[in-house]
Image: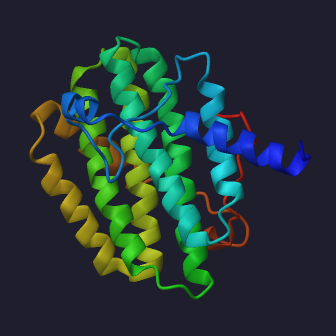
Amino acid sequence: MNKKLLVILVSLLLVGLAFPATPAWAQEQEGISIGEVSDPGILPDSPFYFVKGWGRTIRLFFTLDTSKKAEWELRFANEDALAIERLCKKAKCELAEKHCEKFQERFQRAIQWMERARQEGKDVEELIEKVKENHLRQQQVLARVLEKVPEQAREGILNAIANSSFGLENAIERIQGKHKMDQLREELNLQLNNMGEETRLRIQERLERKRHKPEEVPVGGPQQQEPSQQNPGGNR
């Protein structure tokens, strides 16, 4: 068999395994979705989780448009947020807390690709709104997890909530200005008001601490950062 054809077939197989179709009954049973994602796919507790890392890498490799790369990374972050929730349901809260770092990395890459697309002169207004909407839903899911996990697992989830919000706030301010950032903060605050008092206070305190902490800016400024590329299979 032609080597090029073999590579394509293997790539398609890996992508299919990493992004399985979700049966309608499973979606109804879970009732949780973020954006277009209603199932996290292979979970980190699976021995086949490495396949998901390969599938994601292949998706990004064959995606050349920076806006589309941002959308893929956003989807991956959505999957990771749902994976955190699913792991906690399986009483694997320690693993869920560790996976919060993967969620943060993916969401940050989505923001970086979004900013790169803007630097290239693309119209990213629709993409920004999509990222905002998905982020609010991510925060809702993670906050619900925060209310249920043991105390020792809450630190990682709190960091994921605060760091992802802070990163998006900064990006919105750079792209759209302070007034748009303030609007995003207001939306986040309104969403927090629908949560339990203890959860709301924990998140607000962590957000305020993050916002008032001096930010480390890389040489060349934040807009000059190259979105990092993940090694195949390195998503464990």
* Nearer-the-camera pick, 198 or 164: 164
Question: In the depicted view, which residue is nearer to us: 42 or 168?
Answer: 42
141 to 71, vertically: above or below: above
Give the residue displayed 41% in from the left and 56% down from the top.
166
Seen as rendered, the residue at the extreme front is 1
Is 183 left, or right, of 85 in this rendering?
Answer: left
Quarter of the picture holding the C terminus: top right
Q: Nearer the viewer, residue 122 or 184?
A: 122
* Whether residue 96 is visible: yes
The N terminus appears in which quarter of the rendering? top right
Q: Say if 87 sits above or below 185 in the image.
A: above
Q: Is residue 236 visible?
A: no
Please tell me in which quadrant of the rendered image residue 125 appears: bottom left
* Left or right of 137 on screen, residue 11: right
Q: Quadrant of residue 23?
A: top left
Residue 197 drawn at (x, y percent): 10, 35
Look at 68% across and 72% down and name the residue there: 224
At 20% from the left and 62% from the top, the residue drawn is 187
Instruction: Provide residue 48's location: percent of width, then percent of height.
Output: 61, 21
Report x, y in % for residue 153. Answer: 39, 20
From the viewer's perspective, is residue 228 above or below residue 230?
A: below
* Residue under the image location 44 percent in, 30 percent down: 156
Which residue sits furthest bottom?
121
Counting from the top left corner in percent of width and height, residue 132 is at 33, 63
Task: Quadrant for residue 127, please give it.
Answer: bottom left
